[in-house]
Image: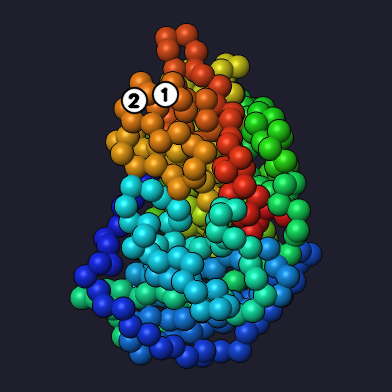
Amino acid sequence: MTRLLRPLALAALPLLGACDLLDDVLSEFDGDLETRSFSVDSSDGKARVDVEIDGQETFQLTATSGQLVAVEAIYDPDGELVLYWEDWYGNESLTGAVWLEGRDTVLNWPVRSVDGELSAGTWQVEVGVVDNEGYYTDATVDAVLKLKQDPDLSDGVVKARIVYADGLMQDEVVSAGVQAAVARWEEVWGPYGLSLDAGYESSAYSTDQAFPGESGEHEDLAQDASGSEVTVLIAETIDGGMDYYGIAGSIPGTLDHTGRALVVVSWLANAGGDGSFSDDDVRLFGETLAHEVGHYMGLFHPVEMTWDYWDALDDTDACQGQGDCEGGLGDNLMFPYPVCDWTSCLAQDQLTDGQTGVSHRYTGTL
């Protein structure tokens, strides 16, 4: 259900250090969510972002620059290395933050329970800035930190801003289908302590949408989101066709206002060629919404369709081959595609404890 990219590796690039804080930190508070904004520069192509922790449970870093950026390392307050990018370029996926996908990168930390808690003190995140020749010198990185102070990581609310593309909110078939699908989404999440707070908006954005981050409309759309909302754009088609049920901007997705700060979902692909919603279509649509926002909250497919890449969770089956994986994981919400026969599709509404933990550690789950 999501197009995933395997970007260029940093293996050939030397590891360098040193950085300087350019601007004073600007802090804002919205309930349990704190936002800090500042800039960091580096003369050698690496920027060190300091994250001061005092009782917060998780943080999210969105780092942007004029060149490609990716997280290279995380150090705890004792100076211990707790994440190194090269460890996650194998056949398990922990976070898309280590991938060179664009001029912004998003890290949510910690991801899993085994990554430990945030101890008080100064954490450091090293961000590499890269061009075609290696590290980009004289780089500036704009950093937006979101920090969550919410000790209950078993019960949380996600705010979803559901935006209809041009004219779709007024289409009774589409609007009824979306509302029924959102009800299914709530039903899927409920057993895992995840509640949905959904609001609806109309817009004049194109009914055929590009992939997240590939349209100027996306950054415009992001500017109107609040600090903890996940924007879901309901389009008719994606990339000119019905090949995609939905696509998340990144894994995890940002709570900042970037061009990839959204999920795009095609109502027509979920309804099928007849353009109407059967009960099975509504169920699929609701599971698509839950699946794509699951990506935005940091969840990967438990196995990719090549059957040789898996998520980094110990309690999702490390299956091999289509038959084995459909049998063991076909009912998992994050399975990479709907499992269907000639009459119906399998309900995909299961999450493991590990997947549930990732969802609750997402900084936007409050």
Q: Are marks 2 and 1 in contact (CB under 8 Å)?
A: yes
Neighbour tally class for label 1: few under 14, some 14-19, many 20 plus, Cα within 10 Å: some
Q: How is the image coloured?
A: rainbow
Q: Is residue 140 above or below residue 254?
A: below
Residue underneath mark 2: 322
Q: In whole angstroms, how far apart are the C-alphas of marks 2 and 1?
A: 6 Å
Q: Is residue 163 above or below residue 325?
A: below
The amino acid type found where label 2 is placed reads: Gln
Q: In the picture provided, is 90 more to the left or to the right than 125?
A: left
- Residue 175 marker: none
Q: In the picture provided, is 293 more to the left or to the right than 243?
A: right
Q: Residue 338: x and y, percent?
A: 45, 25
Residue underneath mark 1: 326
Q: Residue 48: x and y, percent?
A: 47, 81
Element at label 2: helix
Q: Is residue 168 visible?
A: no
Q: Residue 117: x and y, percent?
A: 63, 63
